[in-house]
Amino acid sequence: MLIRKMILNNFRNFKNTEINFSCDPKKKITIILGQNTYGKTTLVKAFIWCLYKINLFEDKILLNSDISDYLLVGKEETAKVMVEFEHKGVSYRITTKETYSRSSSDNIVVAKKAYSTGLKVVEQNTIPISENHIDEEIESILKPELKEYFFFDGETNSIEQVSAKKNLTVAVTNILGISTIEAFKEYYDPHRSDSVPSALRKDLISSDELNAIDLNNQLEKYTQQRQTYLDEIETIEREINELDNQLEEKNNLLDANKDVEKDQNDKKRLEKEIETAKFDKDKAFDRMIQIVNGSSAFLKILFAKSFVKYNLKELMEKSSFKSNSSYKGINEEAVNELIKAGRCICGAEIKNGNDAYRHLMEAKQHMEPHDYSKYISDFVSAEASNIYNAETICENIRSEAGIVNNKIEAIDEYETRLKTIRERIEGRLDVGSIQSEINNIMYQKGHQQSVLENSKSKIPDIEKKIDDINEKITKSSEANEENAFILKCIEYSNSIYQLAITQLEQSKMEIREKLQDEVSTIFKAMYHGNREIIIDENFRASAIVTDGNQDKNLDKSTGLGTVVNYSFVAGLMNLAKQSLLKNELTNDDNIGESYPLVMDAPFSNTDDEHIKNICKTLPIFCDQIIMFVMRKDYNYAIESIREQVGKLYRIQKESETDAIVCEEDL
């Protein structure tokens, strides 16, 4: 498969763009230069959208903004991408479109979802591909699950992420032809009701008809049960794969919005701080009001202030009422009543001239209304104590008022900072909500994996029961000579099935070993450190350092991760070109086919030496390379790939909504 051309019309920031890619075997590389935000990633995602109708953009509206801004209600405009490529001598032209309109509520909406049309040219004959068969045609060339390997995002993609998915083994087996053997195995699987052995057994003649019916009923029961579990497993694996896709999309969104994560966390923290500060302010204000309203606080304070200001404690000294003999609570009127009665309440006689009379007349000088010194003394004593209480009340009021004031100032400061952050992150995704969605997806995936393992655990027992029943059917049929030929055919079918199992295991082992050799060779050519790369039985690639006899996993530096990624992909592509599995069980036309490698930001955070090594090595193993790079990275790479570059383009940004692709001289 070689990509020849891509045309974009009103697609994102490309209004009318055509790019012709180099297919020269001596000049395999096409370079598209562009700064950040110029549209490099848009072009890579345009390939995937055109071929698979998978929209990887955060903003799902693909129509160019200038076009959509002038779109009238009731009118329609179309975003379109055409990709032209060649595969096994046949030229293909796939065009994908999505139509948009403006709704009555003034929003741009999808009027017709993405759909594809296609043409292929076979021996100069142009043949339309029906819309119903386009997906099938493309998947026969390059399956959707393989897109991560050949449309590669150097900033977010990694073999570790891809290999964590269930489809890695499927991807490798599809690329390298093992899937043909798997299909062959299923065709002769005696546990399937639609297999060759099962069809042959239906023609057997039994000597015990009732027993045969019972055995066949049991067989049908268990084969259906097995198929139910297999269908369930397939459904769950599809759901897990879909969850993986969602997880990848959410993680990509998370990565794309990492720069706003701190602002969003600060926003939440400030909102919480404001809420807390307002609560504390209100509580402090309430406490202050309670102090002011409680126990005549202001009156006490005023008395205390007056007492100090006017020096009321010296009142007695400045007054004529200084006697310590003052009577409090007894006034002259009461004494006059006693004299008038002529007898004290104690029984003593009171009459003019006796001692009791004289004492009472003298005491009248120290009673109200002549003498208030006792009241004044009590007042002075009470107010002296009130001064301390008033000072405490004032201090408490000042303290609470200070808290109120501080909280008001803090709220004002927080709200100013919050306003700035809100303006900065306006329109950006909420990273926290994305993380919550990721957690939810992970929970769903964990549940589905548990269900999957449970379903898989049922299969061996059911297959054992099927094998036992098949053996009983065979034995009950051996007595009838008419069954001899059919039984021999069944025996051959079972042998073929076992051969397919053996061949499948051997092929996987062979592929893994060859992939290990290929990837290791490429890795050593690319990586300038002292590292090794290994491929495990599930085709997962990882880099290790060997210390004595113990392998230690490495910390995944970005430079190392990039080299691991490209080593794996280049090794996979090189094996895909080789006819490894041409044998008595396979005749897959896709075996031996080459594939393009389309790379966005391939050298992100990779050092200069690794860039040069990657550029020297990739063209050896890849028949077509399309790179979307920044000029600074290209400047590091140019010396290593100068002779291999067949086309050079530059993205020119006319505005935020319009970019053009200009070809440059080599």
Image: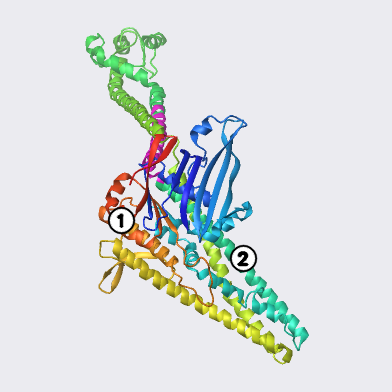
Disc 1 is placed on an element classified as helix
Query: From the viewer's perspective, is the residue at label 2 or at label 1 nearer?
Result: 1
On the image, the x and y values in percent for residue 422 come to 41, 33
- Label for residue 231? 2
Residue beneath the point at 33% across and 28% down: 406
Query: Which residue is at the front of the view, 509 or 623?
Result: 623
User: Magenta includes 268?
Assistant: yes
Residue position marked by numbered label 1 in the rendering = 559
Disc 2 is placed on an element classified as helix
User: Magenta includes 616?
Assistant: no
Dot 2 or dot 1, earlier in sequence: 2
Position of residue 158 in the picture relative to residue 189 (left or right)? left
Whole-angstrom CA distance, mark 2 to mark 1, is 42 Å
Res. 476 image quadrant: bottom right
Position of residue 236 in the picture relative to residue 628 (left or right)? right
Q: Specify the amino acid type for callout 2.
A: Asp
On the image, the x and y values in percent for residue 122 come to 56, 58
Q: What stretch is highlighted in magenta?
A: 256-285
Q: Is residue 435 visible?
A: no
On the image, the x and y values in percent for residue 378 come to 30, 19
Residue beneath the point at 63% across and 54% down: 132
**Secondary structure character of the magenta stretch overall:** helix
Query: Which residue is at the front of the view, 214 or 361?
Result: 214
| Mark 1 closeness class: few <14, some 14–19, many ≥20 residues within 10 Å | some
